[in-house]
Image (cartoon, rainbow, N blue to C red):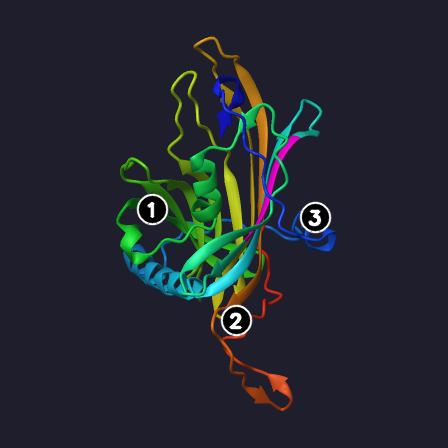
Amino acid sequence: MRNKWWVAAVMASAMVLGVSAQDQDSFTPMPLDAGFGPMDLSAPPIPADQIIQKFAAKETEFQEALDHYTYRRYARVQTLDDDNKVDGEWYEVDDVIFDPSGKRTERVVYAPESTLQRVMMSPSDFQDIQHGYPFVLTTSEVGEYNIKYVGKQKVDEVNCYVFDVVPKQIEKGKRYLDGRIWVDATDLQIVVVDGRMVPDDTKRGHEDLHPPFMTWRQQVDGKYWFPVYTKGEGILHFSGGNGYMEEDVHIRDIVKYTDYKRFGSTSKIIYQGQDITPTQPNTKNAPTPTKP
């Protein structure tokens, strides 16, 4: 997120591609019924390194499955004034789909003109929305992080292993999670992510800053935990410099992921009049992990 005071260019008007009023997401917060239980600091039942290897393998399997799903993403970025009222907003609805050749692509289906006045979206903001917030930690990426076992904790009714995740080093052009993950102790998949995407650019007068966020997953197909909701919020301090204004900006990011459908699935399995096709998406009423 960059402060608009030092940006001369004006964001181009966005396209509207026929999303009806009923299709526009209201961004009602997900229910926060229970929360996080007490942290059990005792040693895990098996060595932490083995748990890390196992959940990284399951995350790799999940990422491969996710690459065969289409879904709709609603993303909203707001600035709030001193009375906590919205005074600017960027909003976009995208379908993550496959083109006729089978290549993964994104299609903007609704994008009204941004009303953000004090900040503007930066390339890293879009990168976080597309890839950072729905964080997946695969076997090929796990070596990029220092991962520390914290303990065991129940998130609603889900028993989880908890790990702190910090990048070992920052490679230019890449975004990393600096935060904490909760891993389902049975399915060995991430169910909650809490932290920040880094790095921030803190150079005076050129800041590109990002709020902390939390992402929740739910089960789809009774097997994989898919991202369903992200909320990020914080006050970003822009220090000014080079004749630009020093300012604190209250930022709120909300992203919803809906309508998961497996691409290319055409057959169905019917048993006693019910569709039990394993590849037919069916979001469970699984407990929704919530923030303390």
Residue at the disc numbered 3:
26
- The verdict on residue 92 being magenta is yes
Amino acid type, label 3: Ser
Q: Secondary structure at mark 3?
A: loop
Residue at the disc numbered 2:
221
Q: Secondary structure at mark 2?
A: loop
Magenta span main SS:
strand
Magenta stretch, residue numbers: 88-94
- Outermost residue, top direction? 243
Graded by Cα atoms within 10 Å as few (under 14), some (14 to 19) or many (20 or more), the crowding at tag 2 reads some
Graded by Cα atoms within 10 Å as few (under 14), some (14 to 19) or many (20 or more), the crowding at tag 1 reads some
> Residue at horizontal 30%, vertical 51%?
141
Comparing 255 with 290, the one in front is 255
- The verdict on residue 80 being magenta is no
Q: Position of residue 53 (x, y in %)?
A: 30, 59
Front: mark 3 or 1: 3
Amino acid type, label 2: Asp
Q: Quadrant of residue 251?
A: top right
> Residue at horizontal 63%, vertical 91%?
272
Residue at the disc numbered 1:
148
Amino acid type, label 1: Lys
Which quadrant is home to the C terminus? Answer: top right
Lower position in the chain sequence, tag 3 or tag 1: 3
